[in-house]
Amino acid sequence: EPEVTQTPSHQVTQMGQEVILRCVPISNHLYFYWYRQILGQKVEFLVSFYNNEISEKSEIFDDQFSVERPDGSNFTLKIRSTKLEDSAMYFCASTDRRNTEAFFGQGTRLTVV
Amino acid sequence: AQSVTQPDIHITVSEGASLELRCNYSYGATPYLFWYVQSPGQGLQLLLKYFSGDTLVQGIKGFEAEFKRSQSSFNLRKPSVHWSDAAEYFCAVGSQGGSEKLVFGKGTKLTVNP
């Protein structure tokens, strides 16, 4: 069964460092998403990406965040200068069309120290 | 704005007992509704979805959910719980044509006693 894969599963970084979280969406999917879940809180939408551009973003997704699809298979989330409050589980998701069920990866746990 | 409420943070049931997890949503139009499950160390797996039509939907692993527009609810049920159902369950709402994002509830953690 096709699945969304994320790497790494866990990343520890120092405050102020840049991190890149990587995702390989399902191969025939066209819409890509990042969500995050701070420990004990809701899963929150960050950004959606379609046709090589951001289609929607939340107020959380400020200038320190960026997304990219560098090739035909990867989808990345970059956090430029990490803060302690960026510590969370980050989920990548993909869909084959708009407004339908999303398929999620297993998540990357980011710990900022 | 869309919102989802899962009133029960933690539920404990005995194996073989029935289960109902509650979900209430707030949305101005007809929503898309989903239940996802997250086992420890795993991602979010889709259990079932409601888009339109029959308000009782069947999902994987023997789960079902019923959409009740009058109550703005989408409760998840299972007639007989198995120990492997222990996990965290998330209700989510999506838009049928507007925003692409899913809005999640805070989740309900299910513990199954032998």
Image (cartoon, coloured by chain):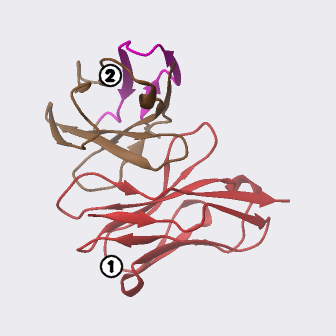
> Which part of the image, by quadrant, shows the C terminus of chain B?
bottom right
Residue A70 placement, left or right of A10: left
Residue A103 in the image, given as x and y percentages of width and height: 40, 45
Q: Which residue is mark 2?
A: A79
- Residue shown at 44%/77% (left/top)? B73
The colour applied to the residues of chain A in this rendering is brown
Q: Which residue is mark 1?
A: B53
Measured as percent of width and height from the top left, residue A93 is found at: 36, 40
> Which label number is shown at residue B15?
none
At 76% from the left and 72% from the top, the residue drawn is B17
Determine crowd level at label 2: few under 14, some 14-19, many 20+ residues with C-alpha closer than 10 A. Answer: many
B109 lies left or right of B12: left
Check if mark 2's residue and mark 1's residue have beta carbons within 8 Å: no
Res. A30 in view: no
* Magenta extent: A4-27
Residue A70 in which image quadrant = top left
Q: Residue at x 72, y 65 (%)?
A: B81
